[in-house]
Image (cartoon, grey):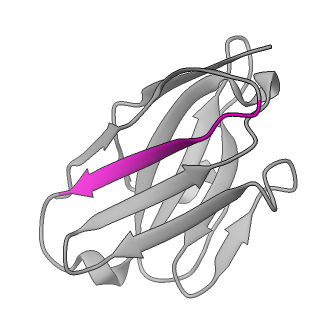
Amino acid sequence: QVQLVESGGGLVQAGDSLRLSCAASGRSFSGYAMGWFRQAPGKEREFVAVIGSQIYYADSVKGRFTISRDNAKNTVSLQMNSLKPEDTAVYYCAARIGIWSITSPSQYNYWGQGTQVTVSS
């Protein structure tokens, strides 16, 4: 069993930066692919970034967001730069058993409670 706790969300202006962090409990953290997803009101949950065997980003965040992990500390982070109002959403950290970098949220085994990111124009 893995528990995930996100932190770092908030209200910022367009062009600002935020860094989200996700702390994972449990062992064998390095054996999980870790992803970030987001869900805006009235929309489906969408892929943002994943780090496992490879790193992938959604086209909408490529060049602005950076995902990283520290296996010694059981954490995964999402550095978000040049934020836009359309980045406003609840951001979720997720873990998938195995190192394959999968982008479909249905393939993830564990989820955090989410952290709100609001970008004003």
Q: Is residue 5 left or right of residue 21?
A: left
Identify the magenta region: 15-24
Question: Which of 31/72 is in front?
Answer: 72
x, y percent for residue 44: 71, 28
Question: Which of 95/13 is in front?
Answer: 13
44 up-or-down from 64: above or below: above
Query: Residue at the spot x=80%, y=13% of the render?
Result: 121
**Labels in figure, total:** 0
Question: Which of 31/119 is in front?
Answer: 119
Q: Quadrant of the N terminus?
A: bottom left
x, y percent for residue 54: 62, 84
x, y percent for residue 74: 23, 68
The answer, for residue 106, to whether it is visible in the render is no
Query: Residue at the spot x=67%, y=12% of the render?
Result: 41
Assess whether residue 51 is covered by the magenta stretch.
no
Q: Is residue 49 left or right of residue 34?
A: right
27 up-or-down from 66: above or below: below
Q: Toward which corner of the image does residue 50 lie, by quadrant?
A: bottom right
Assess whether residue 17 is covered by the magenta stretch.
yes
